[in-house]
Image (tube, helix red, strand yellow):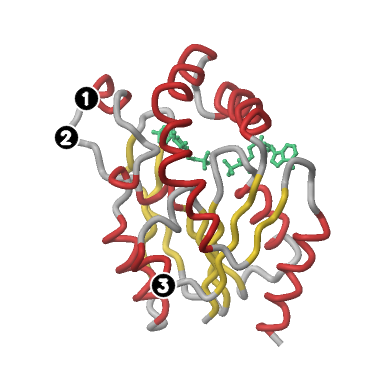
């Protein structure tokens, strides 16, 4: 199994890049795991308490469960990937049965911050977009798709997102084998990564 980690700041286009890569590969060959599925279970907190959580700090992620799941997949065993609800700021009770594939892609802002998880990746990719571009994309996406408003996105950006990005996420660029510039759609880079994957599959 080839495990590829794809990191980068919020709004850089990780999910979009992953979709562009996997869309042209047969579904049974490649699987995707999102770091968002591994936000800590916050069911013991009220909605108001959950909304105050710093979701851009590494301690917001259940890396232990993510590590266990990656080890199971490597052994050829299926996992129950949790499902996260952004509007509720919490895991739902649903899971997605995820079967091991020849290639597994793990994507998320913080996945390269954790030394043990980092070691599990055969290829590490960092998607880069400038911070103003990322903020614009995040604003549009979170208002349209994640039930947020302008005030929520901007205050989260100033109070946690930007400082956490500078402290934890940007420094992980140094671990990347490949950096994808993504201020504009980058089909050349996407095609290169897809070629690496199809080589592995053949
Ligand atoms: N290269 C790009 N140019 C313009 N918009 C983009 C680009 N890549 C992604 N987007 C848009 O930006 C938003 C955030 O992208 P997404 O892939 O969800 O980022 P991430 O997963 O890194 O947070 C989405 O609405 C997506 O359609
Ligand atoms: O309940 C939550 C949990 C996380 N977030 C934000 O999501 C992004 C990470 O997701 P991307 O898809 O990579 O953008 C992170 O910056 C958190 O601030 C949230 O808004 N609510």
Distance of label 3 from label 1 (alpha carbons) = 35 Å
Q: Name the residue under label 1.
A: 46
Q: Residues within 10 Å of mark 1 (few under 14, many from 20)?
A: few
Between label 3 and label 1, give the one nearer the viewer: 3
Q: Is mark 2 on a helix, strand or loop?
A: loop
Distance of label 2 from label 1 (alpha carbons) = 7 Å
Q: Residue at horizontal 50%, vertical 61%?
A: 106
Residue lying at the far top of the rendered structure: 151
Distance of label 3 from label 2 (alpha carbons) = 32 Å
Residue lying at the far bottom of the rendered structure: 202
Between label 3 and label 2, give the one nearer the viewer: 3
Q: Residues within 10 Å of mark 3 (few under 14, many from 20)?
A: few
Residue 201: x and y in percent read 67, 83
Q: Name the residue under label 3.
A: 119
Q: Residue at horizontal 52%, vertical 73%?
A: 3
Q: Residue at horizontal 48%, vertical 25%?
A: 157
Q: Name the residue under label 2.
A: 44
């Amino acid at each position: 199994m080839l495990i590829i980690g794809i990191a980068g700041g919020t709004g850089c286009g990780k999910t979009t890049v992953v979709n562009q890569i996997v869309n042209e590969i047969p579904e049974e060959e490649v699987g995707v795991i999102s770091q968002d599925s591994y936000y800590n279970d916050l069911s013991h907190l009220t909605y108001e308490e959950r909304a105050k959580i710093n979701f851009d700090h590494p301690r917001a992620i259940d890396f232990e469960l993510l590590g266990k799941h990656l080890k199971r997949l490597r052994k050829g065993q299926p996992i129950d990937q949790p499902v996260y609800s952004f509007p509720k700021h919490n895991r739902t009770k649903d899971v997605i049965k995820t079967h091991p594939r020849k290639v597994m892609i793990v994507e998320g802002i913080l996945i390269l911050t954790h030394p043990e998880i980092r070691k599990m990746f055969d290829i590490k990719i960092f998607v880069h977009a400038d911070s103003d571009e990322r903020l614009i994309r995040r604003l549009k996406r979170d208002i349209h798709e994640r039930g947020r408003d302008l005030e929520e996105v901007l205050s989260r950006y100033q109070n946690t997102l930007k400082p956490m990005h500078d402290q934890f996420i940007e420094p992980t660029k140094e671990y990347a084998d490949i950096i994808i510039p993504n201020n504009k759609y980058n089909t050349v880079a996407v095609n290169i990564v897809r070629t690496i994957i199809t080589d592995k599959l053949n």
